[in-house]
Amino acid sequence: MDPLAPLLTLADVESAVNGARAAVDGAYKHRALRRQGGMVAAEISLRCAVASAALEGHRYDLSDVRGGTVLDAVLQGALRVAEALPGLHQHWHSAPRQVLAKLHLLAGTGVLPAATLGRPAEESAARLDTLLEIVTGQAGNPLIRAAVVHGELLAAQPFPGVNGIVARAAARLTLVGSGFDPRGLVAVELAQLAREPEYIGAAGAFATGTPDGLRSWLRHYATAVEQGCAEIAVVGDAVLASVA
C-alpha cells in the first residue's frame, strides 16, 4: 500500500501537482537545453545554492558569490552540497541514510563541530527511519514524495544545524532520482525564497501533521516547483545570448 496516496486526495493537491508536472514538461522544451544544457544546469545550481543559504539567513548577492568574494561558511556549505548533488542522486534511493550524512557533512563543515557532522540525533531516529523507508520504497507521486522528504527533514531537525540546506538538497535528489526533474533544472529554492514567509508558514503547518497543514505544505511545494520552472527560461535565454 502506498503510504502517500491519501495526500493526493487532499483538496486541490492533485491539481497543483498536475500543474507542476505540466510546467516542468514545458520548461524542458527550451531550446537552450539542446546544446547548452550543461551551462544552464550549472547556473541554476549556483542560483539555487545561493537561495538555499539565504533561506538559512545567509543572504548574499549572486554577483559577489560568482566573483568568489563571499567566504561565509553556510554559503560555502550550500555550494559544496550543490556541487556534489549530481554524483549523489544515483545513491539516494538505495542508501539514503549515507547520502543524508554526506549532505550534512558538506553543509556543516566550518559551521558545526566536526564530531557532530553527519550524525542525526537519537531522538529523531524513529521518525527518520520512517521517512527513509518512503525514500527507499520510492512511494507515491515523486513530487509528493519530494515534498514529504523536504517537510519531514525540516520538521524533525535530525541534525544539529543546517537542516534546511540538507532538506532542500534531499528534496532535489528526490525530484532528480525519480525522473520528475532528471536534469536538476527546476529552481525550487529560488521560488521558495521569493515566497519565504509562505515557505516558513507552510513548513510549520506541515509539522502539525493535520490534514490542513499537510495540504498547505503540499500546495506550496507544488507551486514552488511550477514557479521554479520559469528560471529555466530566464537562464536559458541568457545562455543563448552569451553564445550568440
Image: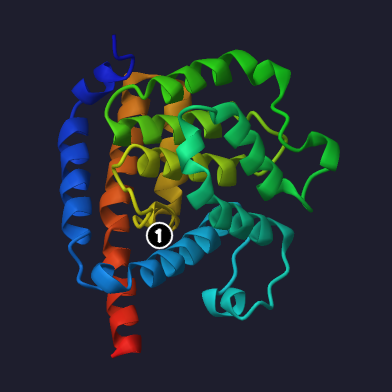
Q: Which residue in the protein does label 1 denote?
A: 194
Q: Height in image: 132 above or below 62? A: above
Residue at screen point 45% across, 29% down: 93
Q: Is residue 51 above or below residue 61?
A: above
193 w.r.t. 134: above or below: below
The C terminus lies in quadrant: bottom left
**Residue 120: x %, y % from top left:** 69, 27
Most foreground residue, 57 or 65: 65
* SS class, disc 1: helix
x, y percentage for residue 212? 32, 25
Q: Residue at x 18, y 52 (%)?
A: 25
Left or right of residue 189, residue 214 in this image: left
Q: Residue at x 84, y 42 (%)?
A: 113
Q: Residues within 10 Å of mark 1 (few under 14, many from 20)?
A: some
Q: Residue furthest top?
A: 1
Please state which amino acid type lies under the numbered disc 1. Ala
In this rendering, the count of numbered labels is: 1
**For residue 172, what is the image quadrant?**
top left
Q: Residue 74 location in percent, x, y?
A: 68, 56
Q: Can residue 105 be seen in this snapshot?
A: yes
**Location of residue 4 by image quarter:** top left
Q: Who is closer to the viewer here, 35 or 61?
A: 35
Q: Quadrant of the N terminus?
A: top left
Q: Is residue 204 visible?
A: no
User: In this rendering, would 89 be left or right of 22?
Assistant: right
Q: Left or right of 86: which side holds 211?
A: left
Residue 185 at what x, y percent from top left? 35, 57
Q: Residue at x 35, y 26 (%)?
A: 214
Residue 153 falls in which quadrant of the image?
A: top right
